[in-house]
Image (tube, grey):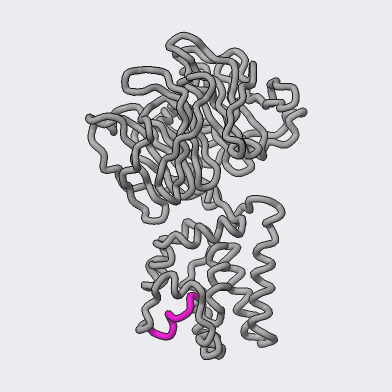
Amino acid sequence: MKELQLKSQSMAGAPASVLLQIVRSSGQDQSSLHYILAILLVAQNGYLLKEIREFTFRNKLYSDQTELKKKKPLFRSQLGSDHNDQSSNDCFLPGLHDDIALDCLALTSRSDYPSLAFLNKRFNNLIRSGYLYQLRRKLGIIEHWVYLACTLMPWEAFDPFRLRWMRLPRMPCDDCFSCADKESLAVGTQLLVFGRELTGFAIWKYSLVSRDWSRCPPMNLPRCLFGSGSSGEIAIVAGGSDMNGRVLKCVDLYNSELGVWESLPDMNIPRRSCSGFFMDGKFYVIGGLSSHTDSLTCGEVYDLKTRTWRIIKDMYPGGIRASQSPPLIAVVNNQLYAADQSMNVVKKYDKVNNSWSVVRRLPVRADSSNGWGLAFKACGNKLLVVGGHRGPCGEVIVLHSWCPGNEQGGDGNWDVLSVRERAGAFVYNCAVMGC
């Protein structure tokens, strides 16, 4: 089984610190040490809690229960635990203080969370509270999932670590929203889908915590064809077109934890059909059109601390045509990459010289449809290309990945993560959620 990816090397020692706490709490009892090994297996390999509880019963590791009950867990008051529960439900993991058990549970794969919620009432409250996701963020633990909407299927999630596909509930939107063009954005534990209903622009939100769809509050100025990017629990939406087709330069920030939109200072230049991203703690917008025909080669960068915009000339040379998709860009390890739609190559941006260089070819063709129907995303420390094609078995969607490293030599092949059959050959929307 593959280990969970950590946000940074500095955070990679988090499991060791948890182990140290467990050792200190368990003393020299040999049976407790066996229990530690079982907990670490849960944390690293994603075994379900049921297996650990069976292990606990077999080895009768309840000797420390009386002592642990005297220490009222911090999380008990947050969830409003039912004191009438059986003694086996008083602790998340029998034999461990809840604070330590929660650290262990935060290390498990989040694809197991729905199963954990079925164990008992307390686990259900824990999963539905979203507390584990907050704890994962604090510990620097992150898993990236890919969310796709393609021709013949509703929204689906793909777990690259377990190579598992999961279908999301059907969105309860009207027919107009279902058939119209849409844009998507993953922020925090939410997937936002922007589109148009009969009454105007609308946003639907899928919550990873509650596992259902609901309406998201509208932007301060509803729009489409904007540039957007997310960092942690916040996202920024810049530019776009309003209901009358007017090109905008207004900017909104969305806080997924509060569920509110905040207006930010306007960009210097109005633009639509642009792309946005976070890099080095700042938000950038590149490419796009300032009118229906005028292409933009400059970029703009927003400093969240000073709340100011700065123009970067010739950041996206060549610009785009009205028939092209917005720039296909991705940021991996604070390095910017782009999929050139005309040359079918991946380019890397040089921050110092404000220039681009070719690093390798794309695994699929982007020129045949001017970049539409293709997804180019960052997925952890890898670049992800998602495209479809028609083969002997029908239409399929293929997920390719590559870990940038030795760009000079251009070595290394694209890995095929998954092939989704009978999924159509056109990627309408794609978003990567890391939490």
Residue 428 visible somewhere in the drawing? yes
Q: Of 117 and 133, which appears nearest the observer? A: 133
The residue positioned 45% from the left and 61% from the top of the image is 113
Q: Of 57 and 299, which appears nearest the observer? A: 299
Residue 197 lies in quadrant: top left
The residue positioned 58% from the left and 28% from the top of the image is 309
The residue positioned 59% from the left and 68% from the top of the image is 41
Q: Which residues are magenta?
A: 86-92
- In the picture, measured across the screen, residue 23 lies left or right of residue 260, that is right
Q: Quadrant of the N terminus?
A: bottom right
Residue 18 lies in quadrant: bottom right
Q: How many marks?
A: 0
Rendering coords of residue 330 (x, y %): 58, 32
Residue 402 visible somewhere in the drawing? no
- In the picture, measured across the screen, residue 338 lies left or right of residue 200, that is right
Rendering coords of residue 255 (x, y %): 46, 45
Rendering coords of residue 212 (x, y %): 33, 51
- In the picture, measured across the screen, residue 387 lies left or right of residue 197, that is right
Q: Check the image and name the residue furthest to the top.
A: 293
Depicted 363 relative to depicted 234: above or below: above
Q: Of 132 and 50, which appears nearest the observer? A: 132
- Residue 89, magenta (yes or no): yes
Rendering coords of residue 243 (x, y %): 32, 22
The residue positioned 44% from the left and 39% from the top of the image is 262
